Image: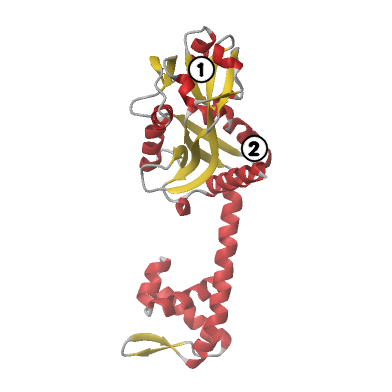
Amino acid sequence: MDKNLLKYLAFVKTVDTGSFTKAADSLNYAQSSISKMIADLEIEWGISLLQWNKKGVCMTSSGKQILPYVRKIVSDFEEIQQKVNEINGIQSGTVRIGTFSSVAINWLPDVFARFQKDYPGIDYEMLLGDYEEVEKWIDEGRVDCGFLRLPACGAFDVISLKKDEYKAVLPVDHPLAEKKLLDYEDLNDQSFLLLEHGGKTEVSELLEKNHAHPNIRFTTWEDYAIMSMVERGLGVGVLPDMILRRIPYQIAIRSFRNPYFREIGLVMKDRTKLTPATRKFIEYLTINERLERL
């Protein structure tokens, strides 16, 4: 740091703390060094800046007049240093992301590809899990941010990103495939392949809220397993649209007359403590998602 700037900082810290000792502790210097820096300023400027009273160190009238200008110089330097750190930070670094499979397979690759064109030095670490696992990783600090179905269970910073429609998947020769739109009651008594892991998930909620009563024959958390079994004629299912954008299976996909959505958001523990690289990635992601909605 420039010597004059360090003297200005010593003056500001001494005024703010009311003590040479506290200013020295704050700046990690000896008290004698802080005193000398301020004395040097008084000699250079030919004015007295500080004086002693019963409460400790206080400013002279000259010190009060000069303080706003010195404080502005210090503030400007801190802003410059912060911007330099941000620039350096987003030239390299690692963004740690927790997510579930449909986002990882069908959304993030395009985001990474676009972002990496502007920031080629940034690396990524991606952990795949279910909602509970991703939320746990965020809370424990294993990832910087994560994609979750909203609302999240914990107390996090949340950015809502998109709504993902649930659609029916059917064998191509199934009678329901002849309909352009399905009613939830069409699922009644159908052999059903349920997308679920552990506790109740969106598909179970969809069935319950819309009073649909299919004959559940298989339960799995693997989207592609459901599509494969549907292709083989083992039943029908309901999957999020995001996973249906790139499918290697010959199946029929139909919307419901009254569509059901899940809300997907980006979740973090405290966005103020994110690294510059992660903040820039989140900014890039949210701006691009808003543009896609236009």
Colouring scheme, one of rainbow, by chain, secondary structure, one colour? secondary structure
The answer for how far apart the CA atoms under marks 2 and 1 are is: 28 Å
- Residue in the image at 43% along x and 19% along y: 188
Disc 2 packing (10 Å; few <14; some 14–19; many ≥20) = some
> Which residue type carries mark 1?
Tyr
Q: Quadrant of residue 22?
A: bottom left
**Observer-nearest of 139 and 182:** 182
Residue 194: image location, x then y, percent: 42, 20
**Observer-nearest of 53 and 105:** 105
The disc label shown at residue 262, or none = none
> Is residue 17 shown above or below 263?
below
- Tell me the residue that label 2 is attached to: 116
Residue 136: image location, x then y, percent: 36, 37
Relative to 37, 112 lies left or right:
right
Residue 270: image location, x then y, percent: 43, 51
Single out the mark in the foreground, 2 or 1: 1
Callout 2 touching callout 1 (CB < 8 Å): no
> Is residue 33 shown above or below 266?
below
> Which residue type carries mark 2?
Gln
